[in-house]
Amino acid sequence: DIQMTQSPSSLSASVGDRVTITCRASQSISNFLNWYQQKPGKAPKLLIYAASVLQGGVPSRFSGSGSGAVFTLTISSLQPEDFATYHCQQSYRTPPFTFGQGTKLEI
Amino acid sequence: EVQLVESGGGLVQPGGSLRLSCAASGFSISSYWMHWVRQAPGKGLVWVSRINSDASITNYADSVKGRLTISRDNAKNTLYLQMSSLRAEDTAVYYCAREDYSSGWYELDYWGQGTLVTVSS
């Protein structure tokens, strides 16, 4: 199975900061990489698919990049509502649709 | 509006059984692959199972193979997860999710709110 590793596991930042989260796959997954945002007690929400395509309604301060085995999620200017946990997921060789362990973004 | 609503979670003893349901509205599940994903308390997301549109293909994580069974009733627009031989490590919030392939990539574009399953004596 393909393993997904996110770094860092947690991150402290301030409103207005630019932050980057990295996701690494154990082998090349082309650009079959999705990012989800999850707030406490809520379901995950799809932010980005195909490594860099914003899901409809997602603010443009979110961006994704990468291909092969290394991917990044960047938030250009943190807003208060962005403090959440972010999960990457590969959808290349399925099943299983493996997730990273999550990155908790805290104030 | 697309909605997924899970139900059926609760407290069950080790070795017991439970059936989760996921009622869909705002779209027809008959056109979509559907998934179950779980999240143990304080932990990350773990993919559990998926089923294709006509139920002819099912896949499972190794950790649940032989104990959890995914199914669907397209006429009722509902997805199910039959859980048996439950273990403490199955304790988690279980989410159902819709897979979208219209873009040519696979992503889970809509999720339910989750239902908590607690396995404990």
Image (spheres, coloured by chain):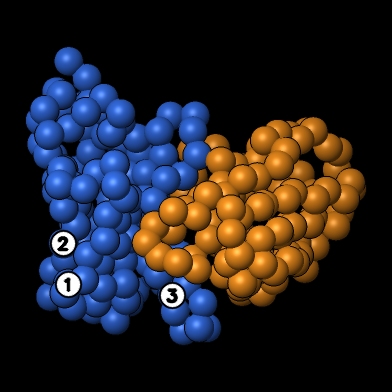
Chain colours: A orange, B blue
Q: From mark 3 to mark 2, how far is it between C-alphas?
A: 18 Å
Which residue was labeled with disc 1?
A: B55
Mark 1 or 3, closer to the camera: 1
**In this rendering, do the residues under marks 1 and 3 share a single chain?**
yes
Tell me if residue B98 comes above or below residue B39 in the rendering: below
On the image, the x and y values in percent for residue B19 come to 14, 46
**In this rendering, do the residues under marks 1 and 2 share a single chain?**
yes
Which residue was labeled with disc 2?
A: B71
Visible residue check, residue B110: no
Q: In this rendering, would A70 be left or right of A98? A: right
Instruction: Answer with mark 1 or mark 3, whichever residue precedes in sequence.
Output: 1
**Quick check: marks 1 and 2 in contact, CB under 8 Å?**
yes
Chain bearing tag 1 is: B
Question: In front: A80, or B72?
Answer: B72
Q: Identify residue type, mark 2.
A: Ser
Residue, x 50% and y 83% (percent of image)? B104
Chain bearing tag 3 is: B
On the image, the x and y values in percent for residue B54 come to 18, 78
Q: In this rendering, would B91 be left or right of A58? A: left
Instruction: Answer with mark 1 or mark 2, whichever residue precedes in sequence.
Output: 1
Is disc 3 surrounded by few (<14), some (14 to 19) or many (20+) residues within 10 Å? some
Q: Where is the C terminus of chain B found, in terms of image quarters?
A: top left
**Quick check: marks 1 and 3 in contact, CB under 8 Å?**
no
Which residue was labeled with disc 3?
A: B100
Residue, x 69% and y 69% (percent of image)? A67
